[in-house]
Image (tube, grey):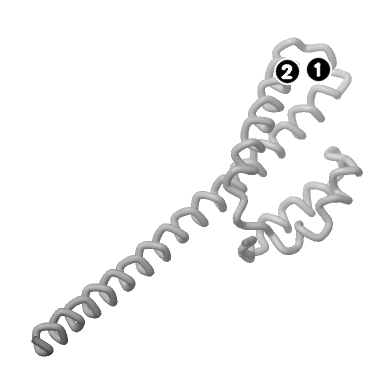
């Protein structure tokens, strides 16, 4: 009787260890997938925001001021930004360390998109590698 009980406990232990290893592997794989989607969503949001800013700066030029096509394009870009921000709030796992600290300050001050400093800063920002920080 004790031998069959020991065999049963050993089998249960082996099954439990195998199941725990599988669950850990699956959790790591799922986390990597979610982080990948979160990073890509953040990049997409940045691209659309920059497009909206650029469209607004072109629309405000004297040559194009009042153009209905550009106005519609600007409105469409802003709607896309708002929709992507909703998704960004849902899947918000990654954040750039450099941008995370000064995000509140950047919200209050709108950059001058016509200056060459803005273009250089934007290019420099895109060339820096992003660092991932998990928020739990």
**Residue most extreme to the front:** 1
Dot 1: few (<14), some (14–19), or many (≥20) neighbours within 10 Å? some
**Residue most extreme to the right:** 109
Q: Nearer the viewer, mark 2 or mark 1?
A: 2
* Residue at image location 46% in from the left, 60% down from the top: 32
Q: Earlier in the sequence, mark 2 or mark 1?
A: 1
Q: Which mark is residue 70?
A: 2
* Residue at image location 90% in from the left, 43% down from the top: 108
* Residue 130: image location, x then y, percent: 63, 62
Dot 2: few (<14), some (14–19), or many (≥20) neighbours within 10 Å? some
Task: Report the side of 13 relative to 92 (left or right).
Answer: left
* Residue 50: image location, x then y, percent: 71, 39
* Residue 126: image location, x then y, percent: 67, 55
Q: CA distance from mark 2 to mark 1?
A: 8 Å
Task: Report the side of 123 relative to 65 (left or right).
Answer: left
Q: Which mark is residue 64?
A: 1
Q: Nearer the viewer, residue 6 or 79?
A: 6
């Amino acid at each position: 009787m004790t031998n069959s009980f020991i065999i049963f406990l050993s089998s249960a232990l082996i099954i439990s260890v195998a199941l725990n290893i599988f669950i850990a592997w699956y959790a790591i794989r799922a986390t990597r997938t979610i982080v990948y989607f979160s990073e890509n969503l953040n990049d997409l949001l940045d691209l659309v925001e920059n497009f909206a800013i650029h469209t607004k700066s072109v629309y405000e030029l004297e040559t194009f001021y009042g153009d209905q096509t550009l106005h519609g394009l600007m409105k469409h870009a802003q709607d896309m930004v708002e929709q992507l921000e909703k998704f960004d709030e849902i899947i918000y796992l990654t954040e750039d360390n450099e941008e995370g600290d000064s995000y509140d300050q950047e919200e209050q001050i709108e950059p001058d998109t016509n200056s060459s400093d803005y273009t250089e800063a934007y290019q420099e920002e895109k060339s820096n590698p992003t660092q991932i920080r998990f928020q739990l």
